[in-house]
Image: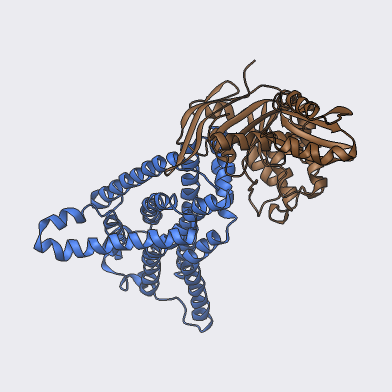
Chain colours: A brown, B blue
Amino acid sequence: MTAAIKVTDLNKLFGRKQVLRALHFTIPPDTIAGFLGPNGAGKTTTLRILMGLIPSYKGNLEMLGCSIPSQRVKALEQIGAVVENPTFIETMSAYENLYWFGSLYKPLPDARIHEVIDMVGLKEATNQRFGTFSTGMKQRLGVAFGILHKPRLLILDEPTSGMDPAGRVHMREILRRIHREEKTSIFLSSHLLDEVQRLCNYVVIIDKGFTVSEGYVADLLATHQEKWEIRMPDEEFERARSLVAGLGLQITIENAPRGLVLTMNAGLSGQVNQELVKAGIKVNALIPHEASLEETFIRLTSDAGDKGGNA
Amino acid sequence: MKRMLFLVLFELKKILNRKKALLFLVALNVIPLVASLALLVAYVKFKSFGFGEVQFSVLYEIVQGLFKGHVKLFSFIAPFFLALVVGDSFSTEFSRGYMKMLLLTPINRWQVITAKTVAIMIFLLLAVFIGGMFLQADLLLARTMTQNSGVIPDSLMQELPDQLNTSKPLNLVSTSSALQLLAMTFFGNLMLIGFFIVFSLFFESAILMSFTSLSVLMGIHTFYLIASNLLSKMDPWYDTLAKWCFSRHLDDLFAIKSIENILEGKANIFAGEIFSTLLSISAWTVAFYLLATLIFSRRQILH
């Protein structure tokens, strides 16, 4: 099947500063994909280039099988997008903004506009001026604009930024519903790793303009991270801690009620266990924990930083 | 095509929603409006004091003056307001993020610039048309005040200027002349729209853009005046350079003699010097539009 997005060897310079360096990733169809990276990694620049807001760059782009920029209009007819905050006309109501901006895709029946307003929970604010909207309402109207013409792909940039926890939960529900009911692939950038882990099944991680890693979330966590709880007698805690810390491996050590929780790169657990046993520490139990995307992200981006290049 | 038409409508709606644009309409038409009302008041006063008919020669001068005044006013004041309207359609839209939202939809950049230009042109046409309507109302009023249905009364024949001292039906300012003057005003300002659009692509503040573009416009025109009148006597090269100052065409177009000739039916915009000036203006308009399209196609939208 055609990839939702395919980016190959994307480079971008702002003046003398290179913000994207041979960036590459492929988003499979029918996924909710997260686009992760620290501040300044190049996420928004990548989205701007994809949407044609930045016309000068080097590299090859494809969205839904359409080459960008030559088939940009054809691609955008099937894509809904909001890059950074939605900036609708402040003096117009939610309905008017959706009508005028949405009709630039194709003529829209009134019922569809009301349907999406209802879907994102803005029914009460249909005739309210956009200028009076809260941050959360603005974000939701942005999503409504994105899905108005029933796109095959929805691209969102930090869709929950500035929202309170309840708003984030609601937004997650909206996006899941769109993916489920309208069969729309979603590609969203976010700083909120926990949120991406809850919502996305595919993830692309970039840092300093490089692709650090990409893949299905489950595979990524299993490939890059191991998290184990090692149970031992209380008197062995400190000795075990200093032993693990002295191994010279990248291991995060946390205290647990009956032992230590170690987060490390995949494949290291055997070596750690061997060292503990060799040192005569009595290991009562080794309990696997599910690694979090946050830990994987921090480890991957710090690895990439250390190597100064593509991981 | 439908998408393009819809975009033009959208842009027009945005322009008409702005207070600056409404101020533009009011400011440019306040003189014809006030003059119409003054004429009406004068008429009523004259009647109520029992003076009978207003002297036709006075009325003739008033209405002719109104037309000249309006056309000159449009050529002097319109650029200031036009710069703001263009600035709002481009510069302000860059800073507020409206342009970003527009470019996220399946529209080409040349379509955006064309739709915005067409919308501003329609707005300008509206501004010119409203002024024209007021002046036409003046004509109707003047005809009523002379209390005849279009034929000059014998009693007034001796008061008429020579060129109107005939037995032809009375026509203070012919509709054709009025329309030609309005078309002239429209085309003259069209070139300025192109000029302002080029500037607006480099700014994110309408006020700053207006200030800069108007300063450049005035600088170019000052150079033209100095180069063509003074410096050319020292070196003919300055005269050649002055010919490239596009603002000179506005001087030629809105020369008071040209306006008078059109009003009196001695000249028309489809022949002679006025026509060649209009052609030059059209060429400059196209050049500015193409330049703006080229710049816009390479502009990065970062807000």
Q: Position of residue A172 (x, y in %)?
A: 78, 37
Q: Which of B210 and B229 is in front in this view?
A: B210
Q: Nearer the viewer, residue A109 or A75?
A: A75
Q: Nearer the viewer, residue A263 or A173?
A: A263
Q: Is residue B164 left or right of residue A259?
A: left
* Count of numbered circles in the view: 0
B191 up-or-down from A51: above or below: below
Q: Position of residue A77 (x, y in %)?
A: 60, 29
User: Is residue A113 at all visible to an observer of this figure?
Assistant: no
Q: Where is residue B185 in the image (x, y as percent from the top left)?
A: 38, 56
User: Is residue A39 at all visible to an observer of this figure?
Assistant: yes
**Residue A228 sits in which quadrant?**
top right
Q: In this view, does B227 lie to the left or right of A113?
A: left
Q: Which of B294 and B289 is in front in this view?
A: B294
Quadrant, the N terminus of chain A: top right
Q: Where is residue B163 in the image (x, y as percent from the top left)?
A: 27, 64
Quadrant, the C terminus of chain A: top right
